[in-house]
Amino acid sequence: MRKVNALLIFLISSVSITGISFVDGRIWEILFYILGMIAYAIVGIMYSIGLIKGRKEGSDAYAFVLFALILAGYGFYKFLERVRIWILGWPLYVKIIVISVLGVALILIIVYKILLYKHKGSLSDYYE
């Protein structure tokens, strides 16, 4: 159990969201609240389909699922951090071109949806 606690402390302390400890603390509270609800829902599904029975198994499953969600979130955060560093390494003209292409694509998609809406009459007709 000490290894798990040490790993959790390492994961949490190595991720600084804003750099301001008071704000980071509030953000972590919200994130753990959300992760706890997701883990609780997953364990509830496991109960309902009969994978686990009893309070002890449920407690162990909740701890495992919560730990797995924390590890997945940490991996996703580190992935986003690497992508950000990779993008910051691009030359300025490439950043401008990419942002311009994405902006034009977004505008074209919005215009297409508007024209499709006017042609079909409503969005519900489009999705049927």
Image (cartoon, grey):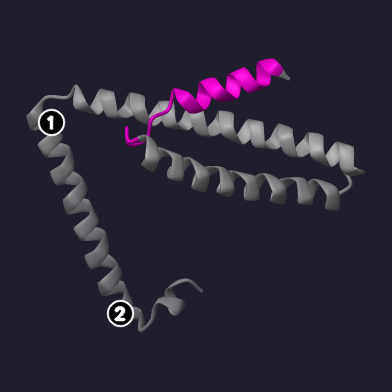
| Secondary structure mostly seen in the magenta stretch | helix
Residue 43 occupies which quadrant of the picture? top right
Residue 123 occupies which quadrant of the picture? bottom left
Instruction: Classify residue 123 as left or right of residue 37.
Output: left
| Magenta span contains residue 7 | yes
Residue tagged by mark 1? Answer: 94
The location of residue 18, given as percent across then percent down, is 32, 36
Label 1 to label 2: alpha-carbon separation:
37 Å
The vertical placement of 109 against 30, above or below, is below
The location of residue 11, given as percent across then percent down, is 52, 24
Residue at the image point whose x is 89% and y is 47% from the top: 50
Q: Secondary structure at mark 2?
A: helix
Residue tagged by mark 2? Answer: 119
**Badge 1 local density, few (<14 within 10 Å), some, or many (20+)?**
few
Viewer-nearest residue: 50 or 38:
38
Viewer-nearest residue: 114 or 89:
89
The location of residue 121, given as percent across then percent down, is 35, 84
Residue at the image point whose x is 30% and y is 68% from the top: 113
View extreme (right): residue: 54
| Magenta span contains residue 105 | no
Viewer-nearest residue: 31 or 87:
31
- What span is in magenta? 2-20
